[in-house]
Structure formats: C-alpha cells, structure tokens
Image (tube, grey):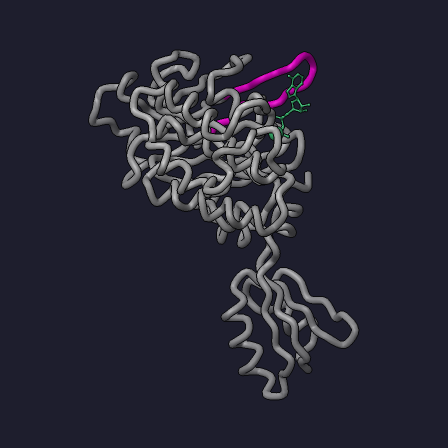
Amino acid sequence: MPLTAIAYETERPSPDPFDQPFPPHGKPVAALINLTKRYGSTTALDNLTLALRPGEVVALLGPNGAGKSTAVKMLLGLIAPTSGTARVFGADPREATTRTRVGAMLQVSRITEMIKVREHLDLFTSYYPRPLPIADIVRIAKLQGIEDRLFGELSGGQKQRVLFALALCGNPDLIFLDEPTVGMDIEARRALWAEIRVLSAMGKTVLLTTHYLEEADALADRIIVINRGRVISEGTPAEIKRNSGGRKIRCHTKLSEDQLSALPTVTAVELISGTTVVTATDAENVVREMLSRDETLSGLEIASPALEDAFLALTKS
Ligand code: ADP
Ligand code: MG
C-alpha cells in the first residue's frame, strides 16, 4: 500500500484524492505507516504499513516473534517507533485524546487477583466518560454466574473472558485483542469468537492478533500476514488461501500427467498410491475439463488448502 493512500483529516483538507483507495469504508481509523521498531539489534517491525478501516475485523496473523504484539503496542501508544508513523483516529496514539475510544486486551495483562469480577468491571467502567452498561458487558462477555467470584479463583479461560470484558468497558470504537484465545480449549475459543462477532455487529473496528489460522479464517474480514516484522500477504481469507497455490483435486483418472499439466491454472500433478492429485487455482474449470475428457473418472474430491498450509506457503522465505 502506498504511503499516500493513508490520509487523515488533520493532515489534508477534504475532499482528498488520496482517500480513493478506501471507499466505501472511509478513512482508516488506525494505521502504521512505514514504521520500523528496533530493540537493540532486533528489528521487530520492518518498514511496516497497515491500516484498519472503520468497522472491519482484521486479523494480524503470524508466527511467534513476527511482530504482532509490537504492532499492537505501537497502535496503543505504549511504545515509540524507531522511525515511521503511528496514527489512531488521526492522532499520535501516545496522545491521551484518543485513549477513551480504544480498548485493549493484551497478552500480559496484570490485574489484581484479590478482587471480584464485578469490582474490576466497576473500576474499569469508572475510568471512561461513556462506559458500556455493566449488564451489557456481562452479557457480551458471558460473565453471568462469575461476577461475584474473585478474579484469582477463575480458570484460565474465564480470566481471558474477564480481560476481554475489561477491553469493552469504555465502549470503545476500536478494540485490540492480542492473542485473545491463547491457552483456551476449542470450545472456549469458539465462544470467544462469537463474542468478537457481537462486537463487529455493533460496528466496532477490531484488530485481533493470532497464530491460529483457523481463528483468522473464522473471524476476519481481512487477514494481514506478517513475518519478521513485514507484511507478506494481505487479503480476505479466501484470497489468502487462493494465493497459496490453489485447491487440490483428487481422483482416479486415465488422463496422463502431461495432459493434466497442460490444463489452464494447473500448478502441480502428482500420483500418490494410485490416486491422481492435481493442484489448480481454478479447480472448477479443471474438473469440468477432466470430466469431459475422461468418462471413467471416479473418486473425485476437491479440497481447499487448510489455512495452515496457506500460511506455511506464505511465510516460507
Ligand atoms: P509476536 O507478538 O508476533 O510473537 P513480538 O512483537 O512480541 O512478536 O516480538 C517481535 C520481536 O521483537 C521478537 O523477536 C521479540 O523477541 C522482539 N521483542 C519484543 N519485545 C521486545 C523487548 N521489549 N525487548 C527486546 N526485544 C523484544
Ligand atoms: Mg505476541
């Protein structure tokens, strides 16, 4: 994305031709622009540019050490860039003015274990000028039944849900969730996904970091894959999968490897214990062609690459 694609009211008069890449979504609510962050000799973010558009759920997907948490901390104004720019609602995120519009659930969140869940909610909502009603927070984060428990007595999954709830207290327009489901079992993860979808339906902009590919696929309007502090791929979950080399067609066919390799969009043909496996970006048309050429074709299966495979293909460098 070109630097000029990110324009703010505070910086340029409206209407602005540089806004064009963003309709119908409008201007980004938050962005990192050519941002580099170094810790000594480690480059955590390497000339990274990304933007969050109003109301979208973006998954920042990458392996451990990719720079996900650094990007979130930068957008929260908790750390300063080595070079480049961070913007939230058109301002420097280190300025307190935007803080009340932002909520965050960080990987390392320390809150006291010695008080009750309800007391944490009372405390956090008191920090904000227009908090969400506590009843709404309890409903969204599914805290019914544990409001009167001490935070320190909760299970790991319940603690995560409370930290998620605390991110919502100020009724933020923009929410950062840094690996919100880490350590949860699949049932608890799916429950939190449903809660994140509620936020999205409320019109909130959500940036979620994850190394669970399934999670990015399930939740995100857009996935930004990062590795070693750089964007390596960006698109809808379907686009990310497509970029990873296409779908696999398995069948028994008398067509030869040469015949199959010659079909449009075929990228690979393998024979695996009697089954032919054809990889193609336009699987439907390849299948149509194969059926028209081989009336004996049988045992047909078409599989999308797991996002896991797509991710491995993308991050291989
Ligand atoms: P992720 O969240 O994707 O796992 P991080 O943003 O936490 O990645 O880290 C990116 C890189 O920056 C890693 O190599 C990590 O070791 C390094 N890093 C992060 N925070 C610090 C810090 N406070 N001091 C030194 N190095 C850091
Ligand atoms: Mg992290």
Q: Identify which residue is drawn at 20% across, 27% down.
A: 15
Q: Is residue 150 left or right of residue 54?
A: right
Report the magenta stretch's main SS.
Answer: strand
Q: Residue furthest left?
A: 15
* Quadrant assignment for ligand 2: top right
Any part of residue 4 in sight? no
Instruction: Answer above or below: position of 172 versus 12.
Output: below
- In the depicted view, which residue is nearer to us: 39 or 254? 39
Residue 98, by quadrant, is top left
- In the depicted view, which residue is nearer to us: 186 or 21? 186
Q: Residue furthest right?
A: 273
- Residue 281 in the image: x percent, y percent? 55, 60
- Residue 278 in the image: x percent, y percent? 64, 67
Q: Identify which residue is drawn at 62% across, 60% down.
A: 267
Q: Identify which residue is drawn at 51% across, 76% down.
A: 288
Q: Identify which residue is drawn at 28% across, 17% down.
A: 10
Taking the magenta stretch, the answer to whether it contains residue 36 is yes
Residue 317, by quadrant, is top right
Q: Which residues are magenta?
A: 35-50
Any part of residue 88 in sight? yes
Instruction: Answer above or below: position of 101 versus 241.
Output: above
Instruction: Answer above or below: position of 221 versus 156.
Output: below
- In the depicted view, which residue is nearer to us: 197 or 45? 197
Instruction: Answer above or below: position of 57 versus 266.
Output: above
- Residue 175 in the image: x percent, y percent? 43, 31
Q: Is residue 260 left or right of residue 218?
A: right
- Residue 240 in the image: x percent, y percent? 53, 48
